[in-house]
Image (cartoon, rainbow, N blue to C red):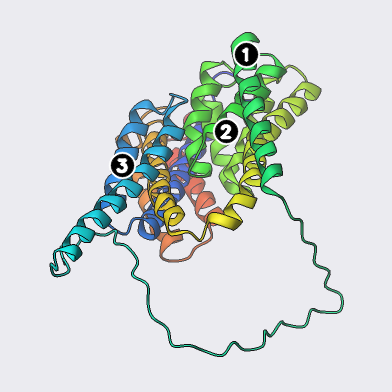
Amino acid sequence: VSGLSGTLPAWVQFIRDGLVSAAVALVALAAYRLGTSLLKDRTTHIINLISFGLSINYYKQPWLFPALMVFGGLTTFTMSYLLEAEEGEASAGHAPNRQDGNEIRPVQPKRRAPTVPAEPQSPAPAEDEVQYTIRISILVGFLFLALWLVLLVASILLRSFTQSSSPWNVLGTFYFTGSIIFGGGPVVVPLLQGYGVENAWLTVPEFLIGYAIINILPGPMFNFAALCGALALRSSTGSSVLGAFLAWFGIFAPGLIIQTAILPMWARYSSLRTSQIVFKGVNAAAAGLVFSATYLLSQTAIDAKPLGNHPLYVVVTAVSFVAVGFLKMPAPVVIVLGGAVGILEWLANGMPK
């Protein structure tokens, strides 16, 4: 990708456009699947809509993503509290139960007949199976949380006081990005494009062709950060490798640290009804970020212009969406077919150079 300096050959541009249009379909499919699995009622649909609307307008603001998660959790918690208080007043006045379609209702305890506990039956482990258990205390969890916070402050300082071409700036930028992103791989792509192009690490054509290539390869979308880091420090092979490692490490490290910090608390409190209500709103807001990623990517998909300006590639996106989502076609095959459509368009246009 770094060798594609200047204007791309026409045939490469056509292939890129086909690949990217198919890749947009995969992001749209991820948003659709999240929506159908997480948005079960009016409250979560409204949270999702607000998250989508704010993120397509202010996605470059670093405070937005954590703020939306807090907003989603507080909204479902508040709605649940208000509904419980309302139903409590109705019960005190011997009012009949309401059936108005509100979606968040307190769980009523069920009476169970006494049972005799059975002897626990544990499956016999295989002879060659070795199981390891690592227990993390809540104190250690808080120490990891403090470590994440210290490194986050350090990353902000590195981004502010080092040159954009510095390895420290690359590390700080990707650690900061990994710390504020919620919603999975597709959400990070518009943010990487914003940071990468604004810092002159890569051009829009380089970003788009790299995004198309990464969709063919196995692994999470966060691996795209390694390509961005390599292009950011492309002055030599050694510096490109360093940039790829710093970006890859920086974007994955925050999630691993936070996961380690939260695990002991999650094991103790995740089954509480309050936790489930809060995470219901958090998940709805995160799903809204994936919907916004679909929109943002579609706006720069073809030569940094909206996908809707090119009817052929709109068809490629729609067909790819149906092929992967409903016909169970493997995603890499659809991406390759999108590139093939680009080649066919190049041929149909007289093979411009």
Mark 2 to mark 3 CA distance (whole Å) = 37 Å
Q: Nearer the viewer, residue 291 or 3?
A: 291
Rendered location of residue 214, percent (x, y): 59, 42
Q: Quadrant of residue 245?
A: top right
Question: At 26% from the left edge and 60% from the top edge, which residue is drawn?
Answer: 103
Question: At 67% from the left edge and 40% from the top edge, which residue is drawn?
Answer: 257
Question: At 42% from the left edge and 48% from the top edge, which residue is drawn?
Answer: 25
Contact? badges 3 and 1 (CB < 8 Å)? no
Mark 3 to mark 1 CA distance (whole Å) = 38 Å
Q: Is residue 291 visible?
A: no
Which structural element holds mark 3?
Answer: helix
Name the quadrant of the N terminus: top right
Q: Which residue is mark 3?
A: 311
Rendered location of residue 284, percent (x, y): 38, 49
- Residue 179 is tagged as 2
Q: Nearer the viewer, residue 186 or 276?
A: 276
- Considering only order in the chain, which callout, 3 or 2, is on the residue closer to the N terminus? 2
Q: Is residue 352 above or below residue 110?
A: above
Q: Which residue is mark 1?
A: 164
Which structural element holds mark 1?
Answer: loop
Check disc 2 and give the amino acid type: Ser
Check disc 1 and give the amino acid type: Ser
Check disc 3 and give the amino acid type: Pro
Q: Is residue 117 visible?
A: yes
Rendered location of residue 273, percent (x, y): 43, 59
Q: Nearer the viewer, residue 259 or 213?
A: 259
Question: At 58% from the left edge and 34% from the top edge, which residue is drawn?
Answer: 178
Q: Is residue 319 above or below residue 250?
A: below
- Considering only order in the chain, which callout, 1 or 3, is on the residue closer to the N terminus? 1
Left or right placement of residue 118 versus residue 180 in this view: right
Q: Quadrant of residue 350?
A: top left
